[in-house]
Image: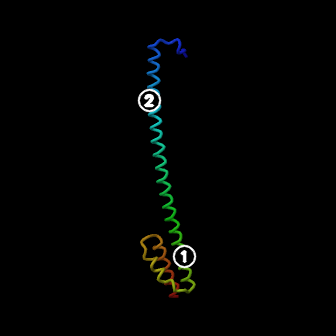
Amino acid sequence: MVSPENLSTDELLLKIKSLKYELEEVKQQKADLEIMIESIAEHSSELNNLYFKKNQELLLYIEQVKQLVAVTQNRLDGDSSDSEVLERIAARNDEIGEIAQVFLIIDKRFTAS
């Protein structure tokens, strides 16, 4: 590397200009990286919220399945007090409703015999 003392004024000015250009590039890269970090943090928060919401939905779904199993077990044990609950669950338009419909069919066959 050439010592700055050995450079002419024009060479020093050219070097300063080059360094200013490099500095501007570094500043732009820094700004771009800050935007990327902000975007990643925002996206991370959105994903965290989505995962939390999905987790809450799954917990509710599991509780509903547990309720369905408990009601069905009560029906099989001869307790008909939950019959409206089982019918209400069977009226749903999702997988739990379909399972409850099967349990109702089993219950009707079980009580008919």
Q: Quadrant of the N terminus?
A: top right
Q: Mark 2 points at which residue?
A: 24
Could you tell which of marks 2 and 1 lies nearer the N-terminus?
2
Kindly identify the amino acid type of the residue bearing the numbered disc 2: Glu
Q: How crowded is mark 1: few (under 14 residues within 10 Å), some or many (20 or more)?
A: some
- Which residue lies at the image location 47% right of the left edge and 16% below the top edge? 12
> Residue visible at 49% across and 48% down?
41
The total number of labels drawn is 2
* Amino acid found under the numbered disc labelled 1: Val
Q: Distance between the residues labelled 2 and 1?
A: 67 Å
Indicate the secondary structure of the residue bearing disc 1.
Answer: helix
Using the image, determine if residue 27 lies above or below residue 105: above
Q: Position of residue 94 (x, y in %)?
A: 44, 70
| Residue at position x 46%, y 50% in the image | 43
Instruction: Please state the horizontal and vertical placement of residue 101, each as a whole percent of the image.
Output: 46, 77
**Secondary structure type for disc 2:** helix
- Above or below residue 84? Residue 98 is above
Of 34 and 69, the residue lying toward us: 34
Residue farthest to the right, as pictured: 77
Q: In this view, does 10 lie above or below 20?
A: above
Considering depth in this image, is 75 or 39 the residue closer to the camera?
A: 39
> Residue 86 placed where, x, y %?
48, 80
**Which numbered circle lies on residue 69?**
1
Could you tell me which residue is drawn at 51 percent across and 80 percent down?
A: 106
